[in-house]
Image (tube, rainbow, N blue to C red):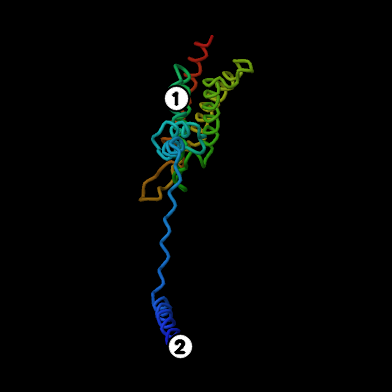
């Protein structure tokens, strides 16, 4: 009996210990620490800031290397530099031809039946084309693009186009003048059947200036 009582006494505390172990709550796992950020190279950081900054030297050099087609500002700067390079007779001839081109956007003829006709939609278009040719040859000579040909060839082409511009403007003045009186579409007055307008006179003036500029430049070249 004493042995049985001793065994029961030893089993009782062992059962109590196991029950306490089961009742104890499980501990939550410890939170993991976030990994430290990788070190950034100072050179790479500076390079990124330089590209991102639109006012940096590298960004300005990148803009300067863009083609005129991609950047209109480059095209405008090139046109300004070209106009500054023109001197003496070349400048006079260029602006004379430019005046002819501008005049073609104005009325060159007025008729009693159809009203005004712009130079671009009339025979004044021929003067417009030869004025453009004059400006092109002035630019080629000023930029020295055709150095492989005889220098007199660009001069001759410029003079021929300038003379044709002037002569055709005078011809247009003649053929657009019809002094036959016809009833005016407005009111009871009469007007000429056809008469030249302001654009034709400006075309003649521009042709004269272009021819004079070419002669002045040719004389200086000689």
Q: Local crowd at mark 2 within 10 Å, few (<14), some, or many (≥20)?
A: few
Does residue 67 appear to the left or right of 84 in the view shown?
right
**Residue 134 place in picture, x, y as percent:** 53, 26
The residue beneath circle 1 is 83
Q: Local crowd at mark 1 within 10 Å, few (<14), some, or many (≥20)?
A: some
**Residue 211 place in picture, x, y as percent:** 50, 21
User: Residue 4: which numbered mark, if any?
Assistant: 2
**Residue 152 place in picture, x, y as percent:** 60, 15
Q: Which secondary structure lies at badge 1? A: helix
Q: Quadrant of the N terminus?
A: bottom left
Q: Tell which of 149 and 25 is nearer to you.
A: 25
Q: Tell which of 179 and 133 is nearer to you.
A: 133
The answer to which of marks 2 and 1 sits earlier in the sequence is 2
Give above or below for 16 relative to 71: below
Question: Taking the image as drawn, is residue 10 in sight?
Answer: yes
User: Residue 96: which numbered mark, if any?
Assistant: none
Q: Residue furthest right?
A: 149
Instruction: Give residue 99's quadrant in the image.
Output: top left
């Amino acid at each position: 009996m004493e042995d049985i009582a001793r065994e029961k006494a030893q089993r009782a505390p062992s059962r109590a210990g196991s029950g306490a172990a089961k009742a104890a709550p499980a501990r939550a796992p410890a939170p993991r620490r976030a990994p430290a950020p990788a070190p950034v190279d100072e050179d790479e950081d500076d390079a990124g800031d330089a590209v991102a900054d639109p006012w940096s030297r590298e960004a300005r050099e990148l803009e300067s290397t863009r083609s005129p087609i991609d950047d209109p500002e480059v095209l405008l700067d090139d046109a300004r530099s070209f106009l500054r390079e023109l001197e003496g007779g070349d400048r006079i001839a260029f602006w004379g031809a430019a005046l002819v081109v501008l005049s073609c956007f104005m009325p060159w003829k007025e008729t009693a039946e159809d009203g005004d006709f712009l130079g671009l939609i009339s025979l004044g278009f021929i003067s417009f084309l030869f004025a453009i040719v004059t400006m092109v040859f002035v630019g080629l000579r000023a930029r020295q693009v055709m150095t492989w040909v005889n220098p007199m060839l660009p001069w001759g082409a410029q003079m021929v186009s300038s003379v044709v511009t002037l002569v055709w403007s005078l011809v247009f003045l003649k053929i657009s003048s019809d002094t036959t009186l016809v009833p005016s579409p407005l009111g009871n007055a009469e007007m000429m059947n056809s008469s030249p307008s302001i654009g034709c006179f400006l075309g003649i003036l521009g042709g004269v200036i272009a021819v004079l500029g070419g002669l002045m430049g040719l004389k200086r070249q000689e």
